[in-house]
């Protein structure tokens, strides 16, 4: 019999992840601060409740997929949090992108309550969430990880056990450093090419032929060229993630000048009004500085 699963946080990624758990046959209880976002899942067989506590009361494994460290603390440890309703032995799987320090702090309180916690952030776009092809990096007790593997496999394609508590979160910090820095570099590359008068589609193809190949150019380069900034990963979230990356570098004594520079450019794009758009909207900050418009008519 499949485990009873709870899912908290039905945003751009979470709604698809939760949907894939239903498709895989897991009994699912859902909660979202905006109740309307639960309706589509309820129509597919999920049960909606009115608090994280109620999710804890009904599930053996509770997944959280929310915006930031304070949000995870609130839904897990708050007055109406998961721990207020969870039975001993309940597994809480945080798939949000939060700081490793916060993840370990929350895990200490979860463990003290007789429950278990895994940190399991994801990599991949909205499309990957929809198609259940996310990458999932997991930290925590290996036996608990193995007991939840079937759940992870319903949402992702590449599931990697990274080690003890917090190691999934550390892995996500390393990845977001690369994603943020390469996205900013792609924007600069296209702006330089536009200013030089290059055919940007040809430039994009040239970058994919050698050492400059990057998923950000392959996936988001054409969207920048065609001025398509539909949100797959919001720019405001990259600002948050890079702040966490820099804090992690400070914690570990590792200088991260590329992350610091990239963050300033994402912040500039957000100040121009593009925070809710896709992360590729960083191009607007580069354009403003270079006096050039990239792509479009």
Image (tube, rainbow, N blue to C red):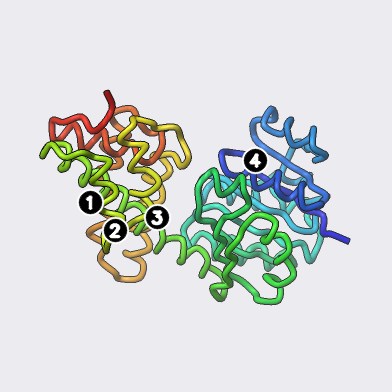
* Comparing labels 4 and 2, the label whose residue is closer to the camera: 2
> Does 91 sit above or below residue 84?
below
Mark pair 3, 4: CA separation: 24 Å
Q: Which of the two discs, 2 and 1, labels the residue nearer the N terminus?
A: 2
Q: Residue at x 54, y 56 (%)?
A: 122
Residue 104 point in image, percent of width and height: 54, 65
Residue 203 point in image, percent of width and height: 23, 46
Q: Residue at x 69, y 27 (%)?
A: 36
Q: Nearer the viewer, residue 296 or 7?
A: 296
Residue 65 point in image, percent of width and height: 60, 48
> Does 178 sit above or below residue 228?
below
Residue highlighted by disc 4: 15
User: For numbered disc 4, what is the local secondary structure?
Assistant: helix
Q: Which of the two discs, 3 and 4, labels the residue nearer the N terminus?
A: 4
Please state, as top left, top right, bottom left or bottom right, where the C terminus lies in the image.
top left
Q: Which of the two discs, 3 and 1, labels the residue nearer the N terminus?
A: 3
User: For numbered disc 2, what is the local secondary structure?
Assistant: loop
Residue highlighted by disc 2: 209
**Label 2: how many residues lie within 10 Å, few (<14), some (14-19) or many (20+)?**
few
Q: Which labelled disc corresponds to residue 261?
A: 1
Q: Residue at x 29, y 35 (%)?
A: 269
Q: Which of the two discs, 4 and 2, labels the residue nearer the N terminus?
A: 4
């Amino acid at each position: 019999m499949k485990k009873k699963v709870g899912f908290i946080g039905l945003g751009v990624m979470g709604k698809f992840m939760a949907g894939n758990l239903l498709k895989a046959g897991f009994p699912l209880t859902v909660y979202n601060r905006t109740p309307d976002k639960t309706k589509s899942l309820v129509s597919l067989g999920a049960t909606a409740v009115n608090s994280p506590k109620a999710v804890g009361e009904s599930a053996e494994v509770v997944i959280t997929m929310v915006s930031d460290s304070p949000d995870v603390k609130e839904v897990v440890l708050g007055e109406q949090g998961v721990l207020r309703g969870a039975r001993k032995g309940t597994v809480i799987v945080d798939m949000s992108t939060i700081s490793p320090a916060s993840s370990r702090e929350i895990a200490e309180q979860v463990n003290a309550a007789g429950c278990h916690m895994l940190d399991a952030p994801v990599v991949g776009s909205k499309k990957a969430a929809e198609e259940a092809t996310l990458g999932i990096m997991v930290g925590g007790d290996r036996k608990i990880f193995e007991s939840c593997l079937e759940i992870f496999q319903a949402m992702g394609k590449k599931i990697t056990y990274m080690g003890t508590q917090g190691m999934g979160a550390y892995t996500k910090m390393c990845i977001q450093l690369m994603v943020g820095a390469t996205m900013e570099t792609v924007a600069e590359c296209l702006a330089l090419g536009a200013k030089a008068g290059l055919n940007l589609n040809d430039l994009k193809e040239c970058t994919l032929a050698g050492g400059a190949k990057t998923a950000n150019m392959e996936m988001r380069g054409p969207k920048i060229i065609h001025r398509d900034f539909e949100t797959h990963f919001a720019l405001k979230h990259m600002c948050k993630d890079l702040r966490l990356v820099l804090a992690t570098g400070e914690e570990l004594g590792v200088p991260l000048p590329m992350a610091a520079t990239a963050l300033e450019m994402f912040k500039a794009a957000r100040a121009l009004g593009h925070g809710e758009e896709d992360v590729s909207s960083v191009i607007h900050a580069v354009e403003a500085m270079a006096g050039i418009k990239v792509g479009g008519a």
